[in-house]
Image (cartoon, rainbow, N blue to C red):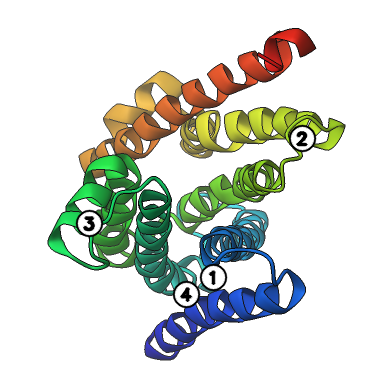
């Protein structure tokens, strides 16, 4: 546990700093804000890939969805804890640099700038804090030695993140009108829907199949805190999926003339 926490605490900030340094060499004309934005998205992609691979490994190795164990289901949580902490700070840095570009001259790390960040990114910050404060104790202690399969499923939810990051990178590079951006948009829709929306019915169906009950009985058979945790996780996913659908409608539904206005 402690070694994993220490390694992850050094790895993500270190990779972020390395990306910024490499971008300063590769793209000397870029501003610090642009290098921070791109570096954050690259690190996010790396973490999401690690989580997805870990999740797939756990799911494939847990034939019994209730009792089978896999060490990654426990160990990777201790990778997520420092990552989520790091990511909140990187989101703050991105917010501060964007605000400064808009002419908002709040002092860095001041109470006003932090409060502005918390207001603007309240949903994402709440999501991260929920994982740190609620899900971490549930997955590491309260569930005992049960349900590694379901922890692996939650890790797989990160599959859509690399494509979301790629979409933001393409927009940052002003490549939003390219075929790559449009194809990537379709992949985002599909992966987000499959891995962040259908994931939850899939987990309930897997449990129902394992214990031999109808799927509609599952919420009454599993602990209440599992239902609450799942509801708390899927709620923001539904909101974000709605936003993605709206962006996709604008991207694929607008004519070239509309986009040029």
Question: Which one is earlier in the sequence, the residue at label 1 or at label 3?
Answer: 1
Residue 250 image label: none
Q: Residues within 10 Å of mark 4 (few under 14, many from 20)?
A: some
Spatial separation of the CA atoms under disc 3 and disc 2: 33 Å
For marks 4 and 2, give the CA distance.
35 Å
Please, is residue 247 above or below residue 255 in the view?
below
Q: Is residue 255 visible?
A: no
The residue to which callout 2 is attached is 181
Task: Kindly report the distance in space between the C-alpha atoms of the residues bearing marks 1 and 3.
Answer: 38 Å
Q: Mark on residue 113?
A: 3
Label 3 vs label 2, nearer the camera: 3
Left or right: where 13 falls relative to 261:
left
Q: What label does residue 75 carry, if any?
A: 4
Q: Badge 2: how crowded within 10 Å, few (<14), some, or many (20+)? A: many
Nearer the observer: mark 1 or 3; the answer is 3
Residue 53 position, x and y percent, is 67, 61
How many residues crowd around disc 1 within 10 Å: few (fewer than 14), some, or many (20 or more)? some
Say which residue label 1 marks: 72
Give the alpha-carbon distance from disc 2 to disc 1, as whole Å: 34 Å
**Residue occupying the point 52% across, 36% down:** 196
Which of the two discs, 4 and 3, labels the residue nearer the N terminus? 4
Vertical placement of residue 179 versus 122, above or below: above
Q: Quick check: marks 1 and 4 in contact, CB under 8 Å?
A: yes
Q: Are marks 4 and 3 in contact (CB under 8 Å)?
A: no
In the rendered view, does 48 fall on the left or right side of 102? right
């Amino acid at each position: 546990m402690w070694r994993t926490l220490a390694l992850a605490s050094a790895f993500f900030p270190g990779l972020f700093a390395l990306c910024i340094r490499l971008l300063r060499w590769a793209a000397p004309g870029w501003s610090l804000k642009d290098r921070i934005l791109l570096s954050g998205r690259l690190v996010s992609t790396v973490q999401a890939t690690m989580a997805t691979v870990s999740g797939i490994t756990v799911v494939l190795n847990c034939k019994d969805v209730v009792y089978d164990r896999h060490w990654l289901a426990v160990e990777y949580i201790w990778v997520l804890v420092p990552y989520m902490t790091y990511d909140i700070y990187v989101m703050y840095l991105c917010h501060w640099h964007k605000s400064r570009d808009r002419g908002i001259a709040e002092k860095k790390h001041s109470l006003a700038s932090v409060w502005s960040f918390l207001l603007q990114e309240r949903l994402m910050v709440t999501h991260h804090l929920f994982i740190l404060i609620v899900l971490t104790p549930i997955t590491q202690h309260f569930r005992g030695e049960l349900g590694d399969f379901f922890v692996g499923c939650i890790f797989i939810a990160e599959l859509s993140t690399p494509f979301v990051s790629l979409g933001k990178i393409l927009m940052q590079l002003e490549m939003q009108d390219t075929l790559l951006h449009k194809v990537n948009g379709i992949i985002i829709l599909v992966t987000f829907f499959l891995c962040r929306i259908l994931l939850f019915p899939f987990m309930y169906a897997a449990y129902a199949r394992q214990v031999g009950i109808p799927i509609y009985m599952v919420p009454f058979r599993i602990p209440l805190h599992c239902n609450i945790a799942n509801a708390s996780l899927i709620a923001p996913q539904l909101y974000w999926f709605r936003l993605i659908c709206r962006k996709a409608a604008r991207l694929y539904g607008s004519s070239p003339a509309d986009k040029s206005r």
